[in-house]
């Protein structure tokens, strides 16, 4: 059994994974309401909250499950907020020693990369390896507040990055755009909510990098275009047009993501395409990606809603399915707050 911990930002998360069964338990403590007061995540506040909550959460896990069966402790080692990562790392090291279990550090982005396969494993755990082999090579799109990138998962389950963002991530662009429009934190979900009743063609916004052959993403120009648009409008006009503004702005983000994914797909031979990361929970994006991929008659794998944001389930899955995850002595495992997809 694998016990996983995730504390890269503002959510404390634990999960238990049994290879023959799947995820047998998941626990999450969200700090969203705490950080709403500040309009965003405050690193020091987030670190103190992890320190306050992880201990009681572990006690709850002990009460519900026999942790003597744990043979591997997995923990997020980066990227993320250094103080938050350090709390999870310290807890994982102590657990590995007390449970006589091996310790592994998992890259947060690799967790997102493997998260669409959680449902594949859950459907038939005893046949997972064969089913996963049938889905490789795999093209994945990770879309979150801090990262937007396309990657390839090869037949040997090695990951190679195809493209990334040159400036803002898609989730960051949605949150910043929401703030420009006067919406509260977290802005992305509020943009989606308002966009549902808006017209995505009401306002024209740029779709990222103009060079059609370029696979990189760029969202800073979109944010700037929104700011210029809002400066030309009165507060009353903004309020009346808010659904249309949100719909048009969100559609620009989605179009850029879908366009680059389509271009990358055409440059390789893929058996499946995955969507993961916090922004993957956006229904309009999921539908657009699903439509794009199913037209090409390959399997579309989207991370489940509870596994799109920061969660320990994806860390546990990657700790078992990713061949690049190797055991490390507790005294040698170090965090890497700036670690990319490696």
Image: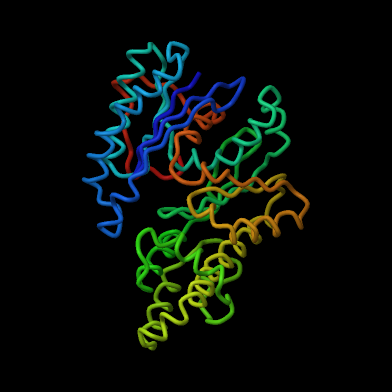
The reply, left or right, for residue 173 in relation to residue 39 is right
The color scheme shown is rainbow
Of 216 and 131, nearer the camera is 131
Residue 133, quarter of picture: top right
Q: Position of residue 51 (x, y in %)?
A: 25, 34
Write the residue at 50% across / 36% down.
314
Q: Position of residue 333 (x, y in %)?
A: 33, 26
Q: Is residue 177 above or below residue 316?
A: below
Q: Position of residue 106 (x, y in %)?
A: 43, 33
The reply, left or right, for residue 70 in relation to residue 7 is right
Q: Position of residue 247 (x, y in %)?
A: 53, 72
Q: Is residue 75 above or below residue 195?
A: above
Residue 180, quarter of picture: bottom left
How many numbered discs, if any? 0
The reply, left or right, for residue 101 in relation to residue 261 is left
Write the residue at 75% across / 48% down.
298
Of 10 and 157, nearer the camera is 10
The reply, left or right, for residue 77 in relation to residue 342 is left
The C terminus lies in quadrant: top left
Q: Is residue 75 above or below residue 273?
A: above
Of 232 and 331, nearer the camera is 232
Write the residue at 32% across / 20% down.
330
Write the residue at 62% across / 65% down.
259
């Amino acid at each position: 059994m694998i016990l996983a911990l995730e504390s890269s930002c503002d959510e404390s998360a634990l999960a238990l994974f049994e290879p023959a069964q799947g995820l047998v338990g998941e626990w999450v403590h969200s700090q969203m309401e705490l950080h709403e007061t500040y309009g965003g995540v405050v690193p020091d506040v987030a670190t103190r909250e992890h320190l306050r909550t992880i201990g009681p959460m572990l006690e709850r896990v002990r009460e519900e499950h026999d942790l003597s069966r744990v043979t591997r402790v997995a923990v997020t080692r980066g990227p993320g907020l250094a103080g938050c990562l350090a709390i999870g790392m310290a807890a994982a090291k102590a657990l590995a020693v007390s449970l006589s279990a091996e310790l592994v550090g998992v890259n947060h982005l690799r967790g997102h990369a493997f998260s669409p396969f959680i449902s594949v494993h859950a459907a038939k755990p005893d046949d997972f390896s064969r089913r996963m082999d049938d889905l490789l090579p795999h093209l994945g799109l990770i879309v979150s507040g801090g990262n937007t990138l396309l990657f390839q998962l090869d037949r040997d389950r090695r990951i190679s990055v195809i493209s990334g963002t040159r400036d803002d991530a898609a989730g960051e662009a949605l949150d910043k755009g929401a703030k420009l429009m006067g919406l509260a934190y977290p802005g992305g979900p509020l943009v989606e909510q308002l966009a549902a009743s808006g017209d995505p063609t009401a306002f024209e916004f740029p779709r990222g990098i103009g060079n059609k052959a370029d696979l990189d993403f760029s969202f800073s120009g979109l944010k700037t275009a929104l700011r210029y648009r809002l400066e030309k409008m009165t507060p009353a006009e903004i309020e009346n047009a808010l659904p249309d503004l949100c719909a048009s702005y969100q559609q620009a983000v989605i179009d850029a993501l879908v366009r680059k994914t389509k271009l990358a797909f055409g440059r390789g031979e893929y058996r499946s395409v995955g969507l993961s990361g916090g922004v993957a929970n956006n229904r309009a994006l999921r539908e657009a990606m699903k439509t794009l991929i199913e037209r090409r008659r390959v399997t579309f794998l989207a991370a489940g809603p509870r596994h799109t944001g920061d969660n320990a389930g994806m860390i546990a899955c990657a700790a078992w399915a990713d061949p690049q995850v190797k055991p490390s002595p507790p005294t040698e495992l170090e965090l890497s707050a700036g670690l990319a997809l490696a």
